Image (spheres, coloured by chain):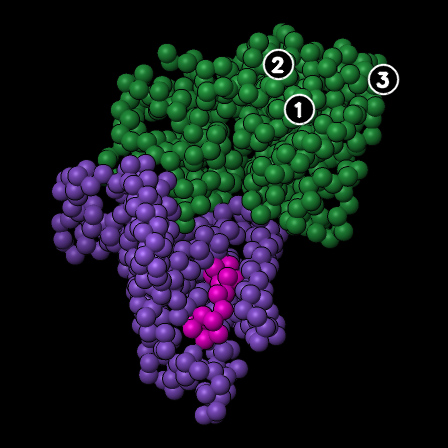
Chain colours: A purple, B green
Amino acid sequence: MKQWQKIVLYLMVGYFILLLGPVAGLDLPRIAQDIARSPSLLVTQLLVGLINGAIIAVIALGYTLVYGIIELINFAHGDLYMLGGFAALTVMGALGVQDGAPFVSSILPMLLALIVAAGFCAGLNILTERYAYRPLRNAPRLAPLISAIGVSFIFQNLGLFWGGLRSFIPIMGNTAAAPKSFPDLLPRINILAAMGIQSKVEFTVKDLVVLVVAVGLMIGLNLFIQRTSAGKAMRAVAQNRDAARIVGINVDQIIVLTFLIGGALAGSAGLLVGLYNNTIVFTMGFTAGLRAFTAAVLGGIGNITGAMLGGILIGLLSALSDQYLSSRWTDAWVFGVLVLILVFRPSGLLGENLQEKV
Amino acid sequence: MKASLKQFALMLGLLSMAASCTPTPTTTAESPAATASPEASPAVASGPAISTDGDVIIASSLPMTGSSLGQTQTIVNSIQLALDEVNSTVCDGKLKVGFQTFDDATAAAGKWDPAQVTANSNTIVANDKIVAVIGTFNSGAAKLAIPIFNQGSLAMVSPANTYPGLTKPGTGEKGEPDTYYPNGKRNYARVVPADDLQGAAGANWSKTLGAQKVYILDDQELYGKGLADVYEKDAKTLGLEVVGREGINPKAADYRALMNKIKDLGPDLIYFGGITQNNAGQLVKDMRNVGMTDVKFMGPDGINEQALIDAAGKDSEGVYATFGGIPPKELTGKGKEWYDAYKAKFNSEPEPYAAYGYEAAQVVLQALGKVCEGNRDAVRETVMATKDFPGLLGTWSFDANGDTTITKMSGSEVKDGKWVFAETLDAKVGK
């Protein structure tokens, strides 16, 4: 970078901070005071951020996996996750699960919903790859990108249509575009209080289940990629597709496998969010997709650990901004930090290792 | 209101099924709402028989796509009811009146869309046969539509806009309301009381419910923010402690962090100035999710609809909402007659704004009856001069600003998954 470019860059960054600071309430002494006044609140918010971050990370993995393998930013991924939520809600409706049903009796429906949502999204993702991306694999890079945006629109409209099927799926409520209430099945029992720990911090069974499942999915994926032969093949394809083909790896199959895993992760995230936030709406894929994509870029797109780190960072940042700044500026902070990191580390936090993208 | 909402839902369901079977038989001459939504066709096709055939046409501009449809469909029904009662003619049968519906929402937005509002308004103004507009539903949409109609001297009567700045000087932002009337003549009136009254009613009610500390949220839209401002001012006047005020991001996936922050401040009531479509359901859910089970949640008429209960599920129990009028079922006298006629004709329960849809249609029809021709400016003048009108809610007039003189309000609460009328509220501005 030339000297003058650097100066212009620093000026822009400085302007950005100076502008956001006073407007968005970045008043450090006040924040320090708030934290000192109620440290337990900080812990509560960190927990909220951690769980939301873990969910974002699970979605971000889908972006990063696909990018690692075929260098395509799959913009339809966020909407796929939304459809996962709809699939899970449909299963709940079909099984007649009531809002607030007892936890024990709803474990089986939840598992079934997980399998159906993951399976449905995996299948849909494979179909998308086969018909929307594979024909364009050797086309200029812009072509599959635009194809992905098109698929995103199709999914969103599919969600809208699905939400309007109230005659067949009564659980969808009265209006297609309105948010749907997702059955609240995970108990809100405070674990810390149940264990006899006196604290203002609350950590419920619901938080625990969502966190465990999200982290479990991430660890599982990591083990799969690092330890299994299929995972090894995925890494090989990511490094060099032609060389992988020479050593006898079926590249098409590996790409299909990648989309299958990414889709299953999106479906699981859809169910998780349904169970955690208890609302799903057809537009949620766009917002979540944008955040997950940001997380993937933040961590270094193509890097799996990076996506997890990015997701959790974004979750924490949002929660802290909601608490200590103002919730109306949260998005500005999240994307502002993204700008900063890309300015100073264009390849993302963990993205320097360009050779090994998966 | 209990069995009836179920009936209404059932009717919607059946109608949508019927609509999905038939290949979009739009009865309007031209379908201005070119949306890709599967909701769009039932909105137009499932209502009463609407005919644009007439010497003059009344247009409606309402969001017929998305979760406002529940309300707006009953408004359209009501307008048609008013027309049917006079056989779609005024002036002893000399002037035939047609009716055309416009959808100002898009499927992509899921609610009213600025571009759609502007496009519709221009289409309406360009059609010489249209002499009056009933709409809009959302105050933000009115902000765009009024100036366009104003330049065409076209009368506009809203059954639902409650943002004070649209008509009342000194209540909104700088330059309001004059900025909406570029030709200097008022062409906009509303049959529903404005928010400054509803905010006061909400603040009064909060006090009656025993709240001492309140936290105020808004959705950063014209309607919601304006309402929260009025509520904040009146709550302070009434001696309630306002522990915080914040605008939410209506697109956020969840509000746990925000609710934890509020919980720490320990309010006993959260007031949300906003609409269901801006995530009110998620707010209620997350409020309960972080353990604020005893804290009350109150909102304006923007959340007083079935969509909130659909979104918030069992967590919506005990949510309070004010409404700038009286729910259809609680009406007496002329209002009761209308309610019975509506139920008999459409076999479903009218949503709260339906009465105002009827009232707006009546005001326009009586003006047309006096003018007896398709002269826009004459109709505008007659509508604005409405005095001692015998309406559903009592006898009222439009004041100089085009506001109704009615101040009756009510509050309702969610009980067993239904909105239930709670009490009549004192809407006297607590100044």
Mark 3 and mark 1: Cα distance apart in space: 28 Å
The quadrant in which residue B379 appears is top right
Quarter that holds the N terminus of chain A: bottom left
Residue A280 in percent (x, y) is at 47, 52
Q: Tag 1, which chain?
A: B
Do tags 3 and 1 sit on the same chain? yes
Q: Nearer the viewer, mark 3 or mark 2?
A: 2
In the picture of the structure, the residue carrying the numbered disc 1 is: B149
Q: Is residue A232 magenta?
A: no
Q: Residue at x 36, y 78 (%)?
A: A356
Q: Tag 3, which chain?
A: B
Boundaries of the magenta span: A65-81
Residue type at mark 2? Gly
In the picture of the structure, the residue carrying the numbered disc 2 is: B184
Give the prevailing secondary structure in the magenta stretch: helix
Q: Is residue A71 magenta?
A: yes
Of helix, strand and loop, which one carries label 3? loop
In the picture of the structure, the residue carrying the numbered disc 3 is: B93
Do tags 3 and 2 sit on the same chain? yes
Q: Residue at x 41, y 44 (%)?
A: B282
Residue A20 located left or right of residue B65:
left
Rate crowding at label 3 as few (under 14), some (14 to 19) or many (20 or more) other CA atoms within 10 Å.
Answer: few
